Amino acid sequence: LTPIFDPGFSEYSYGFRPGRNAHQAVNKAKEYINDGYTWVVDIDLEKYFDTVQHDKLMSLVARKVQDKRVLKLIRAYLNSGVMIDGLIKKTDEGCPQGGPLSPLLSNIMLDELDKELEKRNHKFCRYADDSQIYVKSRKAAERVMESLTVFIEKKLKLKVNTTKSAVGRPWRRKFLGFSFYQMNGEVRVRVHPKSIKKIKAKIKELTSRSKPWTMKYRFKKLKQTITGWVSYYKIADMKSKMRALDQWTRRRIRMCYWKRWKKVKTRFRMLRKLGIKEPKVWEYANTRKGYWRISNSPILARTFTNQLLKKLGYFSFTERYAQVINS
């Protein structure tokens, strides 16, 4: 189906298409803003994959697919249902999330929106169900929001999430995890604060004191997480963010080690091994400070140096960033 439909899709559609990606969408958005389109219409579709009407979608597919067997198969895929608590529930609307066909069907449906935007000569970027339209004034943005909401709900039979959709400045909105800022009259890409919050939550989970994982396993999972995250956000200006994330992550790792050394005897032995001399080693081993507080104190900062943590297996944000920038 991809060779049949993809060539006809909009050049401003970037999601789940051969040779297209999120970075291209973000860079296109940056281009619009640099050209003076500094107001954005951010449209969020409510539970998109759950609300697609099968009849509407099938009529769009049938425009280019005449083989009745293929159409029957696609209809069966849409009607296949979902598993809830071990029971199959039939679905009258929506696309199966995670299914290999769903992203293409999503693009077929939303290509109608793309064509409408092109007809109106709007500057826009769409990645799957995440659409942003760029205009030059608040008034124009509000007008576009109003008319597109009508088009989406009446023509496509989809629901616009009015609480998440908004008109605003690009530097105050999130697009595919990124945002924008201005420096010396030029628009630049940054990581949105919510994306930083999300990666910190993931690292918090991987360095949780309550998890019974070995440090070797934690370092392995941290490396996988950091590698993927930095690779995705590499187009943003984030050198200082990398340093801050490393500092915070190292503190979390130090806390994990301290938690493992529960007994005073163990702390004494391990601190001695790491080079702390008496009488300081007894003072440090007997401390009553909490785990998080200790992780930022000289007790662990002097013993678990950045070099030692690297030797133990910590692959830093800064290291990964240097790799992707220089590759």
Image: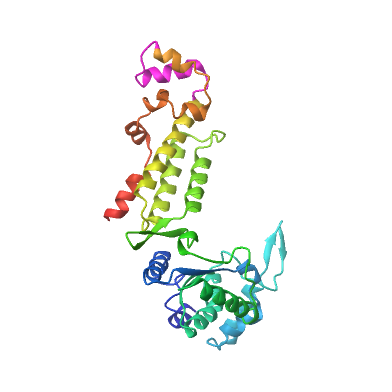
Q: What stretch is highlighted in magenta?
A: 261-279
* Pick the front one: 141 or 304: 141
Q: 163 or 15: nearer the eye?
A: 163
User: Residue lying farthest left?
Assistant: 326
Answer whether residue 272 is magenta in the image: yes
Q: In this orientation, does residue 72 appear?
A: no
Q: x, y percentage for residue 185?
A: 33, 62
> Where does the image place residue 88, in percent across and percent down from the top left?
71, 64
- 160 lies left or right of 255: right
In-front residue for pair 141/84 = 141
Quarter of the image for the C terminus: give it. bottom left
Q: Examine the rendered structure and indicate whether residue 317 appears above or below residue 82.
A: above
Task: Examine the structure image and report whether residue 90 is included in the region drawn in magenta.
Answer: no
> Which residue appears at 34% of the width and 19% of the height?
275
Q: How many numbered markers are drawn?
A: 0
Residue at image point 60% right, 63% down: 164
The colour scheme of the drawn protein is rainbow
Counting from the top left corner in percent of width and height, residue 9 is at: 46, 80
Task: From this view, report whether residue 315 is shown above or below residue 284.
Answer: below
Q: Can residue 209 be seen in this view?
A: yes
Q: In which quarter of the view is residue 248 placed? A: top left
Rendered position, 26 above or below 232: below
Frontmost residue, 10 versus 160 = 160
Q: Residue reaching furthest top?
A: 279
Write down the quadrant of residue 148 in the picture.
bottom right
The picture places residue 29, in percent across and down from the top left corner, at 42, 68
